[in-house]
Image: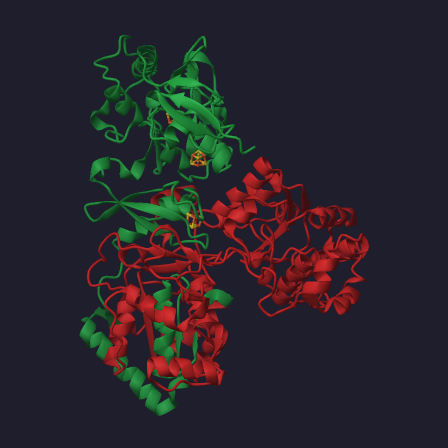
Chain colours: A green, B red
Amino acid sequence: MDQKISLTIDGKKLEASPGQTILEVAGENGIHIPTLCYYKGTTNVGACRVCVVEVENARSLVASCCMPVSQGMMVMTNTERVMNARKLVVELLWSSGDHNCLQCEKNGDCELQDLVYELGIEKPRFDIDSPGYEIEDTNSMIQRDLNKCILCGKCVRVCNEIQVHEVLDFSMRGSNAKVGPAFDTDYIDSECVFCGACVDVCPVGALTFKQARFQGRPWELEKVRTTCPYCGVGCQMDLNINDGKVVKVTTNRDYDKPNQGMLCSKGRFGMNFIDSPDRLKTPLIRRDGELKEASWEETYSYIAEKFASIKKKNGPDSIAGLSSARCTNEENYLFQKFMRAVIGTNNVDHCARL
Amino acid sequence: MTNSIEEIEFTDAILAIGTNTTENHPVIGSRIKRAVRQQGAKLIVVDPRKIPLVKYANIWLRPKPGTNVLVLSGLMNVILNEGLLAKEYIETRTEGFDAFKETIEKYTPEYVEEISGVPADDIRIAARIYGEAERAAILYTMGITQHTHGTDAVKSCANLAMLCGNVGVEGGGVNPLRGQNNVQGACDMGALPNVLPAYQQVASDEARAKFEKAWDVSLPAKPGLTIMEIMDAAHNGDLKGLYIMGENPMISDPDLTHVEASLKNLDILVVQDIFLTETAQLADVVLPSACFAEKDGTFSNTERRVQRIRKAVEAPGEAKADWQIISELATKMNYTMEYSSAEEIMDEINGLTPSYAGITYERIEEEGLQWPCPNTEHPGTKYLHKDKFSRGLGLFSAIDYRPSEELPDEQYPFILTTGRVLYHFHTATMTRRSEGLNEKYPESLAEIDPIVAE
Ligand code: SF4
Ligand code: SF4
Ligand code: SF4
């Protein structure tokens, strides 16, 4: 089991474990092989053929994501033959869709765009022939433009193998092939639970977060890692910020525990409340039956006096506090400290017991 | 949870009782589905409703609402009679087994079927799945706890797990999935009437002395009122002032008429929140606070993992972080609280909370740590009760089934049971403001048996 395999990639002598693929070994050793359909932790399908490499004595080029390493293997990742094959693949993908980067949300963060540049392709040798699908615009969370889809199948695999929502699959064949929910319905009419994982993994602009549309280019967004404020799973996520606003929520599979890059619809699409116009912006004090704006200073004085007089007249146990399962540890700690040390009562609870 | 989320994916059997996991804890739901689809784990679902997980289950037990304890007893009866118990584990690591065994004897599958409606043979099949698994995890939530016999159900889960030697092992455990992001942390931090941080009893002189020294005050020894008692005391006039931070009892508590009358009866109600909630609308004073994206701090998740939240945007208007508001108010009341950051508060927590002693911001920058974590070299604790229970020996409780206190009668012939939905959270103060979530789930639904409906 532990026996190491020695092989050579681009002239470098390397060691690997049995069962590893060429792509994995290359990646571990800092050798770049481009991919489009590869997605760690899911079935390797070898569909896009961008990761092809030349293996000595093999008759044809092999997809490095599917080929296990073997003893003495000699691999070349950037021969002319390899480059030509990759160019052909990328040119075919480019010409078979509507890859207009001008207003694409993925511009600057698109794996197809990067490959075109990396391979130095001026223009595809084939005529551009976009399938002419209508853009799916029937929900406010996920926008689907299948004219940009390169059929890599990552969305299908993340939906079935990682999140196990089992919504997406391929349908039709050949040039009519499509990815989507069963019976070719829109997301909103399907079993889709809007976890947004397919959008996270889509390498191109086929699946995008609709509310983030025109809200900031990828390079303008600042990502701040945080913990989801909803349920007790405590998913790790990135708030994408532009211009002081949360534009969208993405995840990162490198944040392994506890959610391995998974989210649900609440963590993904439940952030509109942050800049809701209904947020409270100033302290309020009830005067003549109505809540009226007040300064912090007068509000603190008002509460302090009231609490002090109750404490004096009726004792500290006639005051109580309800802390919050929604606030931080630090705040819960301070809240109970406030009730116990400042007010002088143990009347503090929160809704865990409900 | 005694064990960790990641362990659920790599166990041999899962018993999910009273948890609609794919809606309430969706990401844990995905782990369960992966365990079944990809790792070959067996799944037992116990729920009166046909929840989405049923599709993945090897067997679905459908008890009448309120008969969970009975079903669990039935499972244990089969395990005992078919010799599927972990004899050595029970002998060396537990106590109270004999009395427990005696109680369980009468809960034969046939007896259980009579009252719960679950076919006796299904109980046998489920018991064999759980009992024969090398490691098995129990997951539960409010479906078994929100009953007058909720405690019995939790203890029955513990009995079942110990009976098969599943506590203190990787992939096993008795795992309550916590509903809110930081309900675990709020308890850990002593936001409870009878305990200080890390469950140190307020009644203990020793515990109080430690906090009195650190906080430089003398502390009350008498345990305080619970949330229900607080409402009652407000109602009858014993309680005069109430300070509510980030809770909305006007929606979340049972019997809203009572809550409203209670809150209105106070001399002063202070509510600190991010929105003018139903509760805040009744307040005398409202304090605007920053939301999770506008401040630093930590939440403790359901597997006891303490994780960071980070300030990403500015709070609106004059709103401030809750910790800032509390410390300024304390200072105004002549008790100085001066903290320049949330991290400084964590430093203080480290010193007073043994289970959090080793959890510093520096250490959880990349990945959260699971308490207990007694010092800064400690790697955190993936699962509890390894080799030894916290109390020494695991205690079997002898539990008899009691019917629910409120049963259908002529005047109220039906049972109403509440549930959650994937797209909304708790009182929906936050999720109702999301365009997408509302689109997907615009209004609450009542589900009713078609025959009854006619
Ligand atoms: S949003 Fe989630 S459930 Fe819906 S199709 Fe994408 S991956 Fe599947
Ligand atoms: S929608 Fe995106 S992820 Fe799915 S197959 Fe098309 S390009 Fe790949
Ligand atoms: S993203 Fe969903 S599963 Fe994860 S913590 Fe938030 S609410 Fe829970």
A310 displayed left or right of B126: left
Q: Nearer the viewer, residue B190 or B111?
A: B190
Vertical relation: A340 (above or below) A326 = below
Residue sitting nearer the eye, B93 or B452: B93
Q: Position of residue A129 (x, y in %)?
A: 31, 12
Q: Which residue is more in the foreground, A269 or A127?
A: A127
The residue positioned 38% from the left and 32% from the top of the image is: A28
| Along the viewing direction, whichever of B353 and B45 lies nearer the viewer | B353
In the rendering, at what x and y percent does residue B285 appear? Answer: 28, 73
Whether residue A342 can be seen here? no
Snapshot quadrant of residue B319: bottom left
Residue A28 in sight in this render: yes
**In the depicted structure, whether residue A67 falls above or below residue B229:** above
Report the side of B399 relative to B446 (left or right). right
Query: Horizontally, is B46 left or right of A105 in the view?
Result: right
In the image, residue A90 lies at what x, y percent? 32, 16
Tell me which residue sits at (44%, 12%) in the image: A174
Which quadrant of the view contains residue A255?
A: top left
The percent coordinates of residue A184 (x first, y second) are 46, 24
